[in-house]
């Protein structure tokens, strides 16, 4: 497989999408060969931990071992305009990516690694069940946009405030259910998923959220609802009280345990 490059891009636009979500558009000549089919997949921001001069240095001059990497969904990509759009949950938690996004200014340079693969629903299933918290809302939004017009199912989305709901393009047969939980420590995502009627037939599931909620959804989908693993995408996108490095270590420990 071809090595995924690191690209130096710059911030073209940064605006509040909803109270707790920033929309950041990145641009640059380095996007000339960025794959169009990466929408809904993710890129990693490669962020300095000190005062490294990203703007003034060639990538090869930087010691990237000291940088941190944080994943963000490719919400959209316009090849002609060389515009890559990400939606970032901010503010509310301290972290290098959150801090970078909060302070980002038009013209700022940033390194981007990727894209990674897009993992989607099985459109041949009888029904779809989707669930996401705010970090996974951009990816869920892409999944909904891609569904066939006659798809049916349920999407449960947890946001931090009522005003964080956003317009989504979903087929009419998909019931979009918003859950407002202002405190990430009191997530109701798994409970609300359990509260929805389970669709008839073979169900394909797509869910991404905080680590503990993911574990609850995993038990529900696989053990209680008998969803086949091949019909399912289930991922934890972050972990409460853990940096992304600690989150990844917890994921590894789960796999090995
Ligand atoms: C495939 C994939 C796609 C993703 N796409 C997106 C996306 O499009 N938009 C997006 O906003 N996030 C997305 N995420 C999640 C994002 O990568 C994490 O939230 C990441 O930890 C943020 O990095 P940070 O440097 O801000 O915080 P970190 O340094 O990782 O963590 C610092 C502290 O912040 C807390 N924290 C981290 N994230 C959150 C959060 N979302 N809400 C509340 N507290 C948090 C941690 O528990 C920790 O205490 C994605 C993750 C994956 C794996």
Image: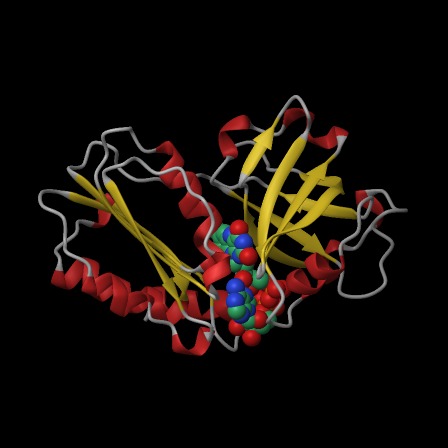
Taking the view exactly as shown, the residue that stands out farthest to the top is 80
User: Above or below — where is 15 with respect to 152?
Assistant: below
Q: Where residue 169 appears, x then y in whole percent?
A: 40, 37
Taking the view exactly as shown, the residue that stands out farthest to the front is 163
User: Above or below — where is 135 with respect to 57?
Assistant: below
Q: Where residue 120 appears, x then y in whole percent?
A: 35, 39
The front one of 140 and 2 is: 140
- Please tell me in which quadrant of the rendered image residue 27 appears: top right
Give ligand 1's quarter of the image. Answer: bottom right
Left-right relation of 257 to 166: left
User: Above or below — where is 17 with respect to 211?
Assistant: above
- Tell me what residue is drawn at x 13 percent, y 57 percent: 225
The front one of 174 and 147 is: 174
Total numbered labels placed on residues in the image:
0
Q: Where residue 51 appears, x then y in whole percent?
A: 85, 63
The quadrant the C terminus occupies is bottom left
Whether residue 182 is visible: yes
Q: How is the image coloured?
A: secondary structure
Q: Where residue 214 appears, x then y in whole percent?
A: 34, 64
Whether residue 67 is visible: no
- Tell me what residue is drawn at x 83 percent, y 50 percent: 54
Left-right relation of 104 to 248: right
Taking the view exactly as shown, the residue that stands out farthest to the left is 201
Left-right relation of 20 to 219: right
- Tell me what residue is drawn at x 45 percent, y 46 percent: 139
């Amino acid at each position: 497989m071809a090595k995924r490059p690191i690209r130096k891009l710059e911030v073209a636009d940064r605006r509040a999408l909803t109270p707790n979500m920033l929309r950041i558009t990145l641009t640059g000549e380095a996007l000339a060969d960025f794959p169009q089919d990466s929408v809904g997949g993710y890129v990693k921001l490669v962020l300095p931990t000190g005062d490294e001069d990203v703007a003034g240095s060639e990538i090869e001059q930087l010691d990237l071992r000291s940088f941190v990497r944080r994943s963000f969904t490719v919400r959209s990509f316009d090849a002609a305009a060389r515009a890559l759009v990400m939606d970032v949950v901010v503010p509310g938690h301290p972290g290098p990516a959150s801090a970078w996004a909060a302070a980002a200014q038009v013209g700022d340079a940033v390194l981007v690694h990727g894209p990674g693969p897009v993992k989607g629903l099985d459109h041949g299933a009888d029904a779809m069940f989707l669930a996401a918290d705010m970090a996974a809302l951009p990816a869920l939004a892409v999944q909904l946009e891609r569904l066939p017009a006659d798809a049916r199912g349920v999407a449960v989305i947890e946001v931090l405030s009522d005003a964080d709901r956003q317009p989504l393009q979903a087929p009419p047969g998909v019931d979009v259910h918003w859950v407002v939980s202002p405190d990430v420590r009191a997530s109701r995502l798994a409970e609300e998923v359990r509260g929805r009627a389970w669709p008839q037939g073979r169900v394909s599931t797509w869910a991404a959220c905080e680590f503990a909620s993911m574990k609850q959804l995993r038990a529900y989908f696989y053990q209680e609802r008998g969803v086949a693993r091949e019909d399912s995408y289930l991922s934890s996108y972050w972990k409460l009280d853990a940096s992304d490095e600690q989150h990844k270590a917890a994921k590894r420990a789960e796999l090995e345990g």
